């Protein structure tokens, strides 16, 4: 994952009044924690952080954080959580976790599908994107920006699962279950409709045949009586 730098500053008491003041200054509240040290309240420049998020494929970023007003002014951090306003989407708060570049961390990484599936290109199939983020464990230095999957060989009915990524990323431990679907090619919609119609007709025919057999059996029973 490419190196990203951000400068924030240490702030005082976390109160509603101070948060309102921060927002007027174009900043958002944040916190720095981890490595068994006391959490530090931060003021993070909103525009700069928005720009970083806009150019990233995931919010779980590794950031070299410069903190004004602290003895150790630079930290390698993982963006552990970003809170957004449920309606406007505005940034509300961000959590930074202290990490070391050579320590193992658990983080969500986005899945990027590349290429055009043969089943889609040649037979009109539909590519279904499965889960879009996968939980992994590896050293911070080896966290990829995304997990790239080439779907070109996929034919109709074929699927790529998490366990298919193991050989592609030997330095990564995948924490989600291996059978989880990442990409699948479904039959074209018209074919599905035809199949459903045929199955419906077969079921109706079987039902009618069963009714005729029941009726015949009932007649036989009446004649015997």
Image (tube, rainbow, N blue to C red):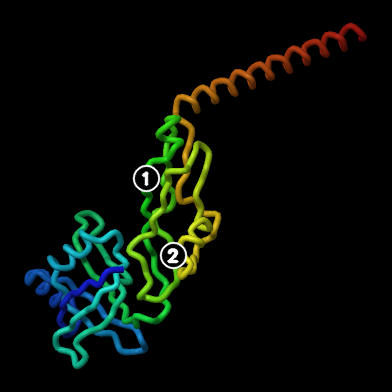
- Looking at the image, residue 18 sits to the left or right of residue 81; the answer is left
Quarter holding the C terminus is top right
* Residue lying at the far right of the rendered structure: 224
* Sequence-wise first label, 2 or 1: 1
Q: Secondary structure at mark 2?
A: strand
Q: Secondary structure at mark 1?
A: loop
Q: Residue at x 21, y 66 (%)?
A: 92
Label annotation for residue 115: 1
Q: Residue at x 44, y 33 (%)?
A: 125
Q: Residues within 10 Å of mark 1 (few under 14, many from 20)?
A: few
Figure check: 71 above or below 83: below
Q: What percent of the width, then of the height, locates residue 100?
A: 34, 83
Q: Residues within 10 Å of mark 2 (few under 14, many from 20)?
A: some
Closer-to-camera residue (38/133): 133
Q: Residue at x 45, y 64 (%)?
A: 169
Figure check: 29 above or below 157: below
Figure check: 124 above or below 68: above
* Residue lying at the far bottom of the rendered structure: 71
Q: Residue at x 25, y 61 (%)?
A: 56
Closer-to-camera residue (144/22): 144
Residue denoted by label 2: 135
Q: What percent of the width, then of the height, locates residue 102?
A: 38, 81
Closer-to-camera residue (19/129): 129
Label annotation for residue 221: none
* Residue lying at the far top of the rendered structure: 223
Q: Mark 1 and mark 2 in contact (Cβ < 8 Å)? A: no
Q: What percent of the width, then of the height, locates residue 133?
A: 40, 58
Quarter holding the N terminus is bottom left
Q: What percent of the width, then of the height, locates residue 25?
A: 7, 72
Of circles 2 and 1, the one toward us is 1
Closer-to-camera residue (40/106): 106
**Rendering quarter of residue 179:** bottom right
């Amino acid at each position: 994952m490419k190196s990203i730098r951000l400068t924030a500053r240490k702030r005082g008491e976390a109160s509603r009044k101070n948060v309102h003041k921060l927002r007027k200054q174009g900043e958002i509240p944040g916190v720095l924690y981890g490595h068994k040290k006391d959490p530090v309240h931060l003021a993070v420049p909103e525009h700069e952080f928005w720009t970083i998020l806009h150019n990233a494929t995931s919010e779980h970023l590794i950031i070299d954080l410069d903190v004004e007003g602290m003895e150790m002014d630079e930290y390698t951090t993982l963006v552990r959580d970003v809170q957004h306003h449920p309606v406007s989407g505005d940034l509300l708060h961000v959590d930074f976790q202290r990490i070391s570049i050579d320590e193992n961390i658990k983080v969500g990484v986005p899945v990027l599908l590349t290429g055009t599936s043969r089943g889609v290109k040649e037979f009109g199939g539909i590519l279904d994107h499965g889960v879009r983020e996968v939980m992994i464990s590896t050293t911070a230095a080896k966290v990829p920006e995304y997990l790239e999957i080439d779907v070109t060989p996929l034919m109709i009915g074929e699927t790529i699962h998490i366990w298919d990524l193991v050989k592609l990323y030997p330095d990564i431990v995948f924490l989600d279950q291996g059978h989880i679907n990442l990409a699948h090619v479904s039959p074209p919609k018209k074919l599905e409709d035809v199949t459903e119609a045929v199955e419906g007709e077969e079921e109706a025919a079987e039902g009618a045949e069963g009714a005729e057999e029941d009726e015949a059996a009932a007649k036989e029973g009446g004649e015997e009586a």
